[in-house]
Image (cartoon, rainbow, N blue to C red):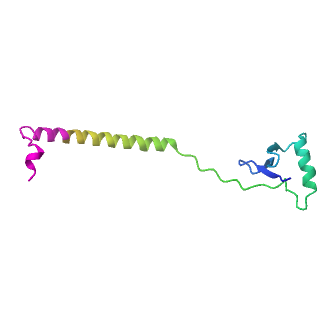
Amino acid sequence: MEYTIVYNYLDGKPIAIDCPEKRISFPICEANSDYQDFLKWNSEQEVPLDLKSTIEVPKPEPARDLAVEVTTIDERVTVLEEEKETLKLQVEALEVSMIGVKEEPLEEKLP
């Protein structure tokens, strides 16, 4: 039989025992019969699993400042709206400058 300790990734402490051979996991709870079987097995091991062991818990990423992100996005939207207006005026100017220009079919321009 083989057992492994399952750790809580929030505080790094053991929360359950996994037994792949039986395809079960069970909580660390004195009233649980599977846990009692594990304790018996563990006491018979040359190197028992350490139920007081912990794992290193990764530090959470710092919280994002959503107010700053919203402000940045609002500023970008304003710039894009201004660029849109500029492009609209340029298109209108091109359309006005094209009045009276006759387009020749592409075939006539080829040698």
2 in relation to 30, above or below: below
The location of residue 43, given as percent across then percent down, is 93, 55
The location of residue 81, given as percent across then percent down, is 31, 39
The location of residue 90, given as percent across then percent down, is 19, 42
The residue sitting at 28% across, 43% down in the picture is 83
The residue sitting at 77% across, 49% down in the picture is 6
The residue sitting at 82% across, 43% down in the picture is 26
Q: Quadrant of residue 89?
A: top left
Relative side of 85 to 63, left or right: left
Toward the viewer: 50 or 102? 102
Residue 3 inside the magenta-drawn segment: no
Where does the magenta region start and end? 91-111
Relative side of 99 to 39, left or right: left
Relative side of 80 to 43, left or right: left
The residue sitting at 67% across, 54% down in the picture is 58
Relative side of 63 to 111, left or right: right
Q: Quadrant of residue 28?
A: top right
The location of residue 14, given as percent across then percent down, is 79, 49
Toward the viewer: 29 or 81? 29
Residue 109 inside the magenta-drawn segment: yes
Toward the viewer: 99 or 60? 99
